[in-house]
């Protein structure tokens, strides 16, 4: 048992450390106004409201994360936190309900597969020589994809499944990355059907180009792929034992109420790759559909979801660890909700102390796909410790 005098000195030391950390964090330009354009690895697949790497990277550089621990991102998205951990030789764990997010993160953080070009040529050869094929049972498929385009997509998927190369997941992700471009959907950020001049030959060419681009990106990494575990799960259902290692920091940007619709953004990608977007929608935190139905969700739902997240975090985070959230405000039926304050208050319920809080501007390029209704221009960076 720690004696009272020692405990007092420990608390005093913590206060001094927090003051130093807070001052260092406060000296950072969290807007990163002069950030460079996206790297090729960042840009391998469309994803809404990406977590820019400068945020987790800067936090990893400043925070004194306890040794022999890993970093957890319970809403991993496209894997930005995990990549920044790998660049620094730090183990990481990511969780996400969205299977497309998990596939992106898995490819970004796994060793580069070999012989991608050979596998690509074999898949394309198989696809083009296939006899007539049967299309999958996907709702409203003919509305969003011209039949010859659907047939080309199914041929490629059949080729990947038949060949089963070591680069199978990379090739599936490459195909996923072009699906909106070859569909009737206007764009990745505009969910409306339009007429496009896309031919089956374009599907094969775009797929090949995407696969080569993806291969170049993973081959170009100049750092070791430190262990990174990805759990395709609803974070609220994950047990502490599934994390598998002590956590020294949580760095994440959670989905928040009535903002982005991640399931809708990847709806047809999920269907084509054999996943169930309706099941993802039912458990997705913050999806707008939950706020425009009978017995619709309210901010109270987000409160309980964050309590569930903190229950997991409190169980796996070591003493002296940090919890970092980047979150924007929401507009729910005309009322602005301060999600950062909700998270901060819940953190205090779990005996976490606030180390730092600041506002940062959301780049105009990230304010896409359903956020305009709320007119939210900033988000909050919140750092807690235990």
Image: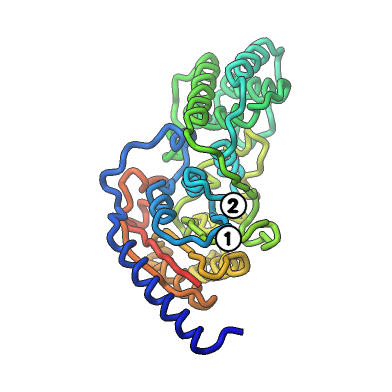
- Pick the residue in front: 22 or 346: 22
Quadrant of the image for the N terminus?
bottom right
The answer to which image quadrant residue 22 occupies is bottom left
Where is residue 272? Give x, y as percent: 63, 33
The answer to which image quadrant residue 152 occupies is top right
- Pick the residue in front: 122 or 384: 384
The residue depicted at 33 percent of the width and 52 percent of the height is: 362
Asked whether, in this view, residue 242 is left or right of residue 35, the answer is right
Neighbours of disc 1 within 10 Å: few (<14), some (14-19), many (20+): many
- Pick the residue in front: 184 or 206: 206
SS under mark 2:
strand
Give the label, 2 or 1, closer to the camera.
1
Residue labelled with disc 2: 93
Where is residue 292? Give x, y as percent: 50, 59
Where is residue 99? Give x, y as percent: 61, 43
Asked if the residues shown at circle 2 and circle 1 are in contact, with their CB atoms under 8 angstroms apart, the answer is: yes
Q: How far apart in space, not on screen, are marks 2 and 1 (Cα)?
A: 9 Å
Q: Earlier in the sequence, mark 2 or mark 1?
A: 2
């Amino acid at each position: 048992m720690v004696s009272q005098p020692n405990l007092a000195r420990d608390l005093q030391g913590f206060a001094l450390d927090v003051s130093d950390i807070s001052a260092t964090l406060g000296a950072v330009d969290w807007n990163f106004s002069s950030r460079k354009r996206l790297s090729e690895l960042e840009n391998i697949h469309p994803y809404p409201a990406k977590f820019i790497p400068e945020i987790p990277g800067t936090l990893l550089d400043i925070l004194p994360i306890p040794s022999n621990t890993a970093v957890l991102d319970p809403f991993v998205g496209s894997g930005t936190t995990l990549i920044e951990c790998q660049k620094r030789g730090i183990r990481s764990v990511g969780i996400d309900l969205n299977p497309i997010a998990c596939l992106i993160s898995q490819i970004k953080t796994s060793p580069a597969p070999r012989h991608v070009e050979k596998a690509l040529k074999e898949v394309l050869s198989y696809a083009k020589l296939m006899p007539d094929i049967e299309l999958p049972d996907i709702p409203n498929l003919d509305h969003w994809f011209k039949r010859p385009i659907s047939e080309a997509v199914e041929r490629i998927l059949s080729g990947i499944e038949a060949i089963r190369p070591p680069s199978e997941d990379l090739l599936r992700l490459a195909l996923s990355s072009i699906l909106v471009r070859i569909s009737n959907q206007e764009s990745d950020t505009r969910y409306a059907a339009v007429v496009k001049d896309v031919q089956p030959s374009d599907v094969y060419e775009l797929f090949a180009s995407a696969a080569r681009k993806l291969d170049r990106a993973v081959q170009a990494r100049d750092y070791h792929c430190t262990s990174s575990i990805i759990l395709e799960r609803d974070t609220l259902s994950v047990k502490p034992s599934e994390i598998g290692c002590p956590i020294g920091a949580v760095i994440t940007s959670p989905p928040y109420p009535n903002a982005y619709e991640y399931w809708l953004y990847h709806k047809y990608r999920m269907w084509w790759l054999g996943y169930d977007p309706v099941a993802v929608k039912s458990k997705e935190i913050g999806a707008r559909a939950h706020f425009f139905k009978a017995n619709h969700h309210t901010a109270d739902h987000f409160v309980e979801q964050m309590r569930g997240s903190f229950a997991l975090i409190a169980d796996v985070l070591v003493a002296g660890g940090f919890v970092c959230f980047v979150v924007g405000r929401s507009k729910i039926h005309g009322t602005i909700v301060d999600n950062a304050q909700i998270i901060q208050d819940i953190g205090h319920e779990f005996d976490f102390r606030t180390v730092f809080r600041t506002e940062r501007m959301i780049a105009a390029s990230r304010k896409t796909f359903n956020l305009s209704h709320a007119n939210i221009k900033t988000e909050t960076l919140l750092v807690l410790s235990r």
